[in-house]
Structures are given as structure tokens and as C-alpha cells.
Image (cartoon, rainbow, N blue to C red):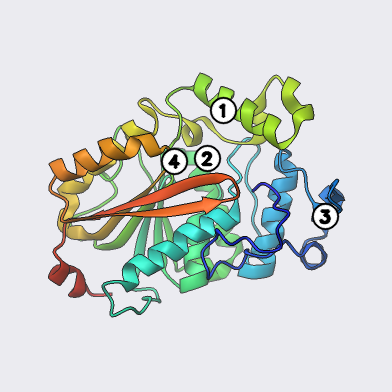
Amino acid sequence: MKPNDNSQKDNLHPRNLHRSRYDFELLITNCPELKKYVAINPHGIETIDFSNPDAVKALNKALLQTYYNIQNWDIPKNYLCPPIPGRTDYIHYLADLLAATNNGVIPTGSSVLGLDIGTGANCIYPILGNTIYDWSFVGTDIDLKAIQNCAKIIEENPKLIDAISLQQQTESRFIFKNIITPEDRFTFTMCNPPFHASAEDANQSTVRKVSNLNPKEKKKTNPVLNFGGHNAELWCDGGEIGFVTQMIYESAKYAMQCQWFTTLVSKKENLSSIYKILNKVNAASIKTIDMAQGQKTSRIVAWTFLSEAQQKSWKI
């Protein structure tokens, strides 16, 4: 969520509502608490300090109120505060993926059921997917406090109550086991996997991120807490490649119960290993969707075990 001096963010998805510069006057009207964080930068443009988690949280609240009719949203201190424009892109690219085997029409409505792996305390993907396309979701996480906060968000926004359900993953070594039952059929799964392999890696990365956003913050001694992000959200044994590898091997056990399995992959160098594993488990189709926001590049890797005919006959 680095500020962008361009009036148009051309690298965001064409349907993304956040391609233009933030309208802070409108956002502050809907969320007055944002006002104290807004200032004029050296280029004469209104912005916020993106290294300040309180400022980013206030911006998120304003965006959710203004564009998605989410009136009550909050996260506990030290939990990840997601950049909404980038999260929205994942949802739109998923919609395009589903449209490809639905006669080019984006499927909408509650019959589209997504599984959000590691939904965090923010519940952002289910919120956006439901608000934009009226999809239903199951959100999972190993962190009980995160699940409890998502439940509070859902309870305080009644339109989400029938659309989003939550389930704690009680065994951290598993991803789909304990979550997908024999009766379940998911249209898609999605995941923003833990990026780092250790707490130390996460700390070093956050120091760099904070210093890039605000050079004055370089001397902070507790950057992860300052920037936001709980341990389980930021790192796991094996890092991103370890997590995605486990996800792929498990997905093969539920091959006929999901139309598309998907995950974000931040490190381009992990792709070749991921493709090898997907071929090893006999994925029928593999797609890589490039995404970008500001100077950050990422991609969605999607795979299915269904033939093209099976995909087209999938009931949405």
C-alpha cells in the first residue's frame, strides 16, 4: 500500500475500484478518524504514513465503509493489516478464472463457495468476495484469537452472517485435513501463505519494509509489532515453499471436491519447484496469474484435478 503519485494505478485489475488515487475527502467523510493521519507529502499529494499500522488500519476502515458497506471492522493490535487494493485484485482474478469455464460469465451468488486458508484476524478475502460477487466463504485459521475477531466482525455486519462461516484448524501441520469433509464441495480455495521461514527472517524483512516506507523508522527495535503481523501470519517452518508444498500434496486428497485450488506465491524463484510438485500429483491444469501493485509483484498459482469437461459441468 505504498502511495502512488500516479492518478491511475494501471497495474491493478481493470475492475478494481482502487485504481485511482485515494479520495481522502470522501474517505474522511465516511470515517472521520482517518483525518488525523492524512498529510501532504513532498509532491503536494494527500497521503498517509504507510509505515504506521494505525494509519493503515484507519484507511482500511474508511475504504471498507465507503466502497463495501462494512460499517464495523477492526483488528487486534499486532495482527496483519491487509492492503485492500491488492487483496481485491486476488478476488477479481479468481472471478476471471471461474468465468473461463462458465461461458465467459463471472459466477455470482451464494452457490459459489470459497475456502480461505489462513483468513487471519481481518477476514478480508471473505468480506471482499461476498461484497463484490455475493460469494459464500468458509474462513479457517490456526489462531483462535484471529477466528474470534473474524466472528466479531461478522456479527457486527449482519449482511455477512449467512455468507461467511469460520473454522479453526486445530492441527497446524495440516491445511485441508479437518476442514474439508466428505460432503463438502468448494468452488475454489485461496491462500496468502506465510512468507518467511523464521521469526528472524520476518523481522529483517519488516525492518526493510518499514525503512523503505519511512526512513526515520530505521531505528525501531520491534519492527514486526510496529508494522503489524502475528507470528502465524508472517512465518512458518519451511516458509512459503514449505507451506505451498504441503497444500499441494493435501489438495490431491480432495481432488474431486474443489474446482480450483489457488494460492499467492510471492517469491518467483519458488515457481519451478511448485510446478514440479503439481506435475507430480497429476494436476490436470495449472495456471499462473501475474499480479502487481506499486513496485511489488506477486502471482496466483491455480491448479485443478478436473478435466475441462468436468470443470464445465461443475454446478455453480
Q: Which badge, 3 or 1, comes first in the chain's sequence? A: 3
Element carrying mark 2? helix
Q: CA distance from mark 4 to mark 1?
A: 13 Å
Q: CA distance from mark 2 to mark 4?
A: 26 Å
> Could you say which disc has been placed on residue 266 in the image?
4
Q: Say which residue appears at 23% left-offset and 75% top-offset.
A: 315
Q: Which badge, 1 or 2, comes first in the chain's sequence? A: 2
Residue named by callout 3: 45
The type of residue carrying mark 3 is Ile
Q: Say which residue appears at 79% left-offset and 61% top-offset.
A: 24
Q: Residues within 10 Å of mark 4 (few under 14, many from 20)?
A: many
The reply to whether discs 3 and 1 touch (Cβ–Cβ < 8 Å) is no
Q: Is residue 68 visible?
A: yes
Q: Residues within 10 Å of mark 1 (few under 14, many from 20)?
A: some
> Could you say which disc has been placed on residue 20 in the image?
none
Q: Position of residue 94 (x, y in %)?
A: 39, 63
- Single out the mark in the foreground, 2 or 4: 4
Q: CA distance from mark 1 to mark 2?
A: 25 Å
- Single out the mark in the foreground, 2 or 3: 3
Q: Nearer the viewer, residue 311 or 251?
A: 311
Q: Say which residue appears at 51% left-offset and 71% top-offset.
A: 132
Q: CA distance from mark 3 to mark 1?
A: 28 Å
Q: Quadrant of residue 163?
A: bottom left
The reply to whether discs 2 and 4 touch (Cβ–Cβ < 8 Å) is no
Residue named by callout 2: 145
Q: Nearer the viewer, residue 195 or 276?
A: 276
Q: Say which residue appears at 26% left-offset and 72% top-offset.
A: 101
